[in-house]
Amino acid sequence: MPRKRRKKRKTQPKTVLASAEAETDKAPKSFVIRRGKVGNKVISLVHDVREVMMPNTASALKEGKKNKLKDFLNVAPTLNVTHMMVFSKSTLALNMRLYRVPRGPTLTFRVLRYSLKQDVASIQKKPHVPTERELLEAPLLVLNNFSDPSPENKILASMLQTMFPQIDVDNMRLKKCRRVLLMNKSLTDGTIEMRHYLIKAAPTGISRSIKKIVRAKIPNLGRLRDISEFIEKDGLVSDSEAEDNEENKVKLPQDFSGRGNQRSNKSAIRLKEIGPRLSLQLLKIEEGISSGATLYHAFQKRTPQEAAELKEKKRREAELRKLRRIKQERNVEKKRKEKEALARQSRIQAGLVEEVQQKSMDAEEEEEEEEGQDKDDSARRKKKKDAKNDAVSKAKKKKKKKKKKETKPKAGYKRPAAKKSSNPRGGESKQKTNENGTSSSPSSIDDDNVGSSSGSTSSSNIKRGPSRLLSCRSVFNGGGGCDC
């Protein structure tokens, strides 16, 4: 009998799941895309930046050649996307635009230098590859030297802060703090350095040998007599432990990831860089999605009067675009109506042509029907005539048969023997006419006078033709009668 499958049960209450879903819905989401021909290195950089923005970004987003920026902007509100990072390459350098969807502003950066994740790992002695579990939570954003009260600095700082979810210090769990994104602004030239780190914690106050045992690493004790020699051995302090200062050592208020990082224990916090690196320079800030007035430009300075003139120019351009759009819509509507009228007229003409064709087809059908009726009438007349001829021929045959039947002798009649003919040559005897006007021949013999010696003949009811007498030899030979 097969084993009964165990029924899976949910271990977390519905309230916890609902709160987690609500948090993910409220968290800001982003698109990281590229536009134009940028090369393989920039494509790898886009994938690395997507990994930094995980899990609140579209990591498997594919940009097609036919996709335009307007397509991504139109689909962004339906997916709750709040920010877009667009990498594009010009003749001078690599640029990055940061959009706040759907109303702006737009920040344009020039990428001065960048290093990929694999480049950062190649210079490390023990590189660390982040796992999927470490990318399940958004990184902590750290802004350094963004305290300048200038308007462009405030816009930049608020833009960077709204890209990541807010931190609730009272209800935050330490196990969710796995990564840090550092934004450091230089005070000399204003460039922004971006670094991506992984947070690690190691228990302090114990030797390197104890750490190995705590971390479930089995040491090599082949040359030792007892494990106490391995624990009490001097000079087993790691380089990283020697570099740890008192500032790095903290008392954990909660359990943290890693062995030995228990609550109320003292651990050293370390940052492991996992890449990528970016050096950015802010070029300009615009209102809207690259369509409004320029609020800040790094290389062009304008007076308030020039700014007002530029604003008025932008307003006139916007009104002109609106008028053009209205005019274009009217032209489209006019063309649509003309097209519909032309189609209606063509349909009417086509209907008249179809009507003429239908009439001609009906006339042809009527002619065919008349021809068919004529053929049927002729066939009927021919059939009637044939039937009449058949009836006439049948009547003639019947009449002929009846006539032939009447000329046959009666049953039981015996023809009398004929006497010698007075014509010795056997020629045809001349017929004699009696008193009654009936003709008789020498071969006409009466039934009452058969066998008489007088040899006289009289008229009788039996007549024999001359061909019959000529063919009978017994008449001329004086026989006793005709047997034919």
Image (spheres, helix red, strand yellow):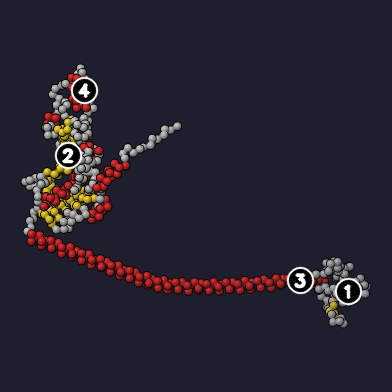
Q: Which label sits in the foreground, 3 or 4? A: 4
Q: Disc 3 marks which amino acid?
A: Lys
Q: Earlier in the sequence, mark 1 or mark 2?
A: 2
Q: Disc 4 marks which amino acid?
A: Asn
Report the residue at 12% width, 29% height from top: 242
Q: Disc 2 marks which amino acid?
A: Tyr
Q: Disc 1 marks which amino acid?
A: Asp
Query: Where residue 111 sits: x, y (%)?
Result: 14, 48
Q: Earlier in the sequence, mark 4 or mark 1?
A: 4
Q: Is residue 122 visible?
A: no
Comparing 221 with 185, the one in front is 185
Q: Are marks 3 and 1 in contact (CB under 8 Å)?
A: no
Mark 4 residue crowding within 10 angstroms, few (<14) / some (14–19) / many (20+): few
Q: Which label sits in the foreground, 4 or 1? A: 4
Q: Earlier in the sequence, mark 2 or mark 4?
A: 2
Query: Where residue 66 sits: x, y (%)?
Result: 25, 54
How far apart in space, not on screen, are marks 3 and 4 (Cα)? 144 Å
Query: Where residue 403 sits: x, y (%)?
Result: 77, 72
Q: Label 1: which residue?
A: 446
Q: Which label sits in the foreground, 2 or 3? A: 2
Q: Is residue 283 shown above or below 456? A: above
Q: Earlier in the sequence, mark 2 or mark 3?
A: 2
Report the residue at 15% width, 21% height from top: 233
**What number is the disc on residue 197?**
2
Q: Dot 3: what SS?
A: helix
Mark 2 residue crowding within 10 angstroms, few (<14) / some (14–19) / many (20+): many
**What number is the disc on residue 124?**
none
Mark 3 residue crowding within 10 angstroms, few (<14) / some (14–19) / many (20+): few
Q: Which label sits in the foreground, 1 or 2? A: 2
Q: Which label sits in the foreground, 3 or 1? A: 3
Comparing 40 with 95, the one in front is 95
Name of the residue lying farthest toward the right: 453
